Image (cartoon, rainbow, N blue to C red):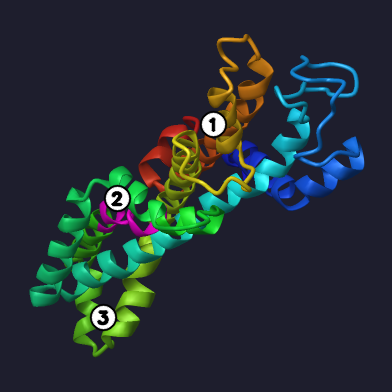
């Protein structure tokens, strides 16, 4: 990987993935604390000493919560990215290649999903659920967030379907399945990867927004739930910046890593951008 943006983004994402997998173990091993362990001798103290990032108003260690909460936030992002991208590929590719009545039906369904108010609908659905955990939140965000990506893929698929190389393969008797998976889909991998990365970021930010509104399980610990608890306890008014600062920084850094990886992949896959970056002979 020559592209510096891809390298930096990949390293940061690998670090977040490791943190999501080993966060609870690291909290227990390095700090000897759980995310909900209370230190009654350190209620709402700032960073330093036994608590490198300080404690909450209830005496819970902020660093332990950041380590444990990485799993919930990253899991929501991955579930959202997989579900939204999968539905977008299924609907967009089918509509763009099939055309005719199939295209009309799927386009109507896509437009209906585009007009639905996503956040109010999630609030209504989550209100009927007893425990809205990370997987549930990711599924809701993914099911309600695929329509815009499907429209992009439909437009690109229609453009590719009209290309000469597809017409030539159709004339020599290639099946529709081979045309889709061997001629059209490979040309969409760059766009699909970009849509997946955008879905992951949208999932993390969406979970943070829903947690801020209180639409998550009270047992769930994520970066979004940490910011929500800080807001409920008036951390900003009390000057307890160490409560909401670290999870906010992690969300921003995670989004930056995704953006760097996305820009780098675009530069590597787009011939125009690649030629622009190459030094003149």
- On screen, residue 37 versus residue 65, left or right, reads right
Earlier-in-chain disc, 2 versus 3: 2
Q: Pointers 1 and 3 in contact (CB under 8 A)?
A: no
For the point 32% across and 70% down, the residue is 90
| Residue 37 part of the magenta segment | no
For the point 62% across and 32% down, the residue is 250
Question: Does 12 appear above or below 45?
Answer: below
Residue under label 2 = 121
How many residues crowd around disc 2 within 10 Å: few (fewer than 14), some, or many (20 or more)? Answer: few
Name the one closer to the observer, 136 or 188: 136
- On screen, residue 238 versus residue 62, left or right, reads left
**SS of the residue at dot 1?**
helix
- On screen, residue 23 versus residue 157, left or right, reads right
How many residues crowd around disc 1 within 10 Å: few (fewer than 14), some, or many (20 or more)? Answer: many
**Which image quadrant for residue 175?**
bottom left
Name the spot of residue 137 as percent of width and height, x first: 47, 53
Disc 2 from disc 3: Cα separation = 44 Å
Question: Does 277 appear above or below 242?
Answer: below
Mark sitting on residue 228:
1
Residue under label 3 = 169
Name the one closer to the observer, 180 or 119: 119
Q: Which residues are magenta?
A: 141-150
**SS of the residue at dot 2?**
helix
Earlier-in-chain disc, 1 versus 3: 3
Disc 1 from disc 3: Cα separation = 55 Å
């Amino acid at each position: 990987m020559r592209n510096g943006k891809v390298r930096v983004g990949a390293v940061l994402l690998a670090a977040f993935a490791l943190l999501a997998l080993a966060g609870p173990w690291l909290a227990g091993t390095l700090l000897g604390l759980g995310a909900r362990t209370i230190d009654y001798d350190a209620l709402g103290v700032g960073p330093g000493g036994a608590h490198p990032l300080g404690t909450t108003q209830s005496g819970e260690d902020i660093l332990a919560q950041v380590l444990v909460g990485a799993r919930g936030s990253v899991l929501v992002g991955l579930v959202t990215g997989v579900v939204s991208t999968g539905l977008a590929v299924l609907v967009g590719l089918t509509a763009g290649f099939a055309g005719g009545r199939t295209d009309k039906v799927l386009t109507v369904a896509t437009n209906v999903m585009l007009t639905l108010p996503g956040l109010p609908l999630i609030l209504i659905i989550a209100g009927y659920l007893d425990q809205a955990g990370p997987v549930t939140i990711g599924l809701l965000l993914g099911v309600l967030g695929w329509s815009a990506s499907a429209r992009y893929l439909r437009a690109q698929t229609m453009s590719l379907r009209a290309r000469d190389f597809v017409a030539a393969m159709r004339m020599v008797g290639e099946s529709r399945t081979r045309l889709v998976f061997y001629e059209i889909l490979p040309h969409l991998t760059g766009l699909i990867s970009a849509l997946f990365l955008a879905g992951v970021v949208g999932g993390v930010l969406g979970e943070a927004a829903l947690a801020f509104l209180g639409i998550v399980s009270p047992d769930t610990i994520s970066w979004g739930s940490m910011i929500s608890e800080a807001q409920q306890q008036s951390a900003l008014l009390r000057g307890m910046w160490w409560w909401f600062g670290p999870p906010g920084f992690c969300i921003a850094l995670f989004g930056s890593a995704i953006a760097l990886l996305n820009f780098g992949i675009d530069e590597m896959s787009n011939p125009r951008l690649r030629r622009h970056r190459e030094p003149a002979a």
